[in-house]
Amino acid sequence: MNILAIETSCDETAICYLSARKNGASVDFSVPANVTRTQVEHAEFGGVFPALAKREHIKNLPVILDRIMDGREKPDCICVTNGPGLEPALWTGIVFAKELGEKWGVPVVPVNHMEGHILSVLVPPLPAGATFSFKDDIRFPALALLISGGHTELVLADSIGDYRIIGKTRDDAVGEAFDKVARLLGLAYPGGPRIAELARRFSGNEPVGLPRPMIHSKDYDFSFSGIKTAVLYMVRERSPLSEDLKAAIAHEFQESAAEVLAKKTARAVEEFGIRTVVIGGGVAANERIVAEITKTVQSAFPETGIMAPTRELSGDNALMIAIAGYFKVQKNPDADYGDIRAEGNLSL
Ligand code: KG4
Ligand code: ZN
């Protein structure tokens, strides 16, 4: 079947055309067209503005659709992110999907953005237009660590589509903390990649210390606002900051986030007998965090696999929505989703 997927939950306008053919127990996917446009317009404000995101999505969607369709046959269904995300942004994708569904006479399927991040790990590094089967099967029970600008969650998965959140952040998401710390250090938005780059320049001289909030708590919750506040005090006390000190703070902040995420993930692996850990979301692009989780989990449980998305698919994109939509349709081919609505706070 052919799927057109649309993602507009935050500041990426993305559309993908995916073809899926069953092949025994596996599925062959090919991706003839996949476009993600990141709205750089937010950078100067230091964060994402919902009204601006909405305006840009409305402008971008028809232009991207023309590039995606480019003589291709109409899809068998349209998958669209219906949450979680910014409601005005989500609505633009939903309205656009409904209009197309009506025009083409094909069903529209709502897809959960977080499930998209989980299933993004199924896609191997991919030249445009290539066909792929699963990179590696996710073995169940699996554990997904979802780390993005809006979410920090640990999710148990007994199969594709069967999820239970066992822990989440009580305040800031880890990506949000990266962005806020970056701002305190005078770096532009989005801060995650910039912190990672600055941390690489840390020479080892003048190390600083930051807390590891909730690392020993018996639950699977997280808290990142305390580290950010500790950075705020450090910046106030020690300004003007030398380049060395900025690098030391970026490095220590990243270590703190990596250690907390790794410890809690490893504990859940032990308690639930996890066979695969899936890391998804924008922060999964952070090599240091993925390395720390891999080391901590596999030193205790060498049989447990770790899967993370390729760099292009760690951030928001429509290919992950197409894949999650494909499995949703397979599971329940005749479902009628009625009048799809944006649900900003939807969970898995
Ligand atoms: O999943 P995503 O693209 O959008 C949301 O759904 O939030 O995640 C964006 C977040 C931002 O907070 C960004 O700073 C963070 O992912 N991020 C990173 C890195 N690349 C992106 N954080 C840490 N290290 C990175 N290399
Ligand atoms: Zn996301």
Image (cartoon, helix red, strand yellow):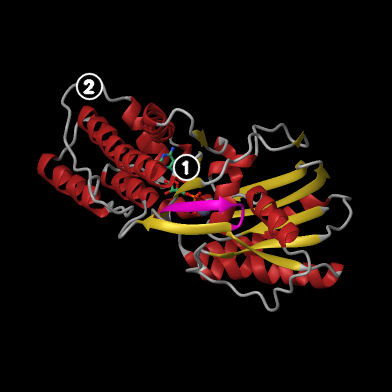
Residue 62 is at least partly visible in this image: no
Residue 97 is at least partly visible in this image: yes
Residue 17 in percent (x, y) is at 76, 50
Assign a secondary structure to mark 1: loop
State yes or no: residue 202 in magenta: no
Q: Residue furthest bottom?
A: 339
Binning the other alpha carbons within 10 Å of mark 1 as few (below 14), some (14 to 19) or many (20 upward) gives many
Q: Earlier in the sequence, mark 1 or mark 2?
A: 2
Q: Residue furthest left?
A: 237
Q: Residue at x 31, y 52 (%)?
A: 222
Q: Specify whether 99 is left or right of 147.
A: right
Residue 43 in percent (x, y) is at 44, 50
Residue 76 in percent (x, y) is at 83, 59
Q: How many marks?
A: 2
Please give the range of residues in magenta.
153-161
Q: Nearer the viewer, mark 1 or mark 2?
A: 1
Tell me which corner region of the image, top left, top right, bottom left or bottom right, holds residue 62: bottom right
Assign a secondary structure to mark 2: loop
Q: Nearer the viewer, residue 234 or 31?
A: 31
Q: Is residue 4 above or below residue 30?
A: below
Read off the residue under disc 2: 204
Q: Is residue 13 above or below residue 24?
A: below
Q: How far apart are labels 1 and 2 at the CA level?
A: 36 Å
Read off the residue under disc 1: 274
Q: Specify whether 325 is left or right of 155.
A: right
Contact, mark 1 vs mark 2 (Cβ under 8 Å): no
Q: Amino acid at mark 2?
A: Gly
Q: Residue at x 48, y 59 (%)?
A: 164
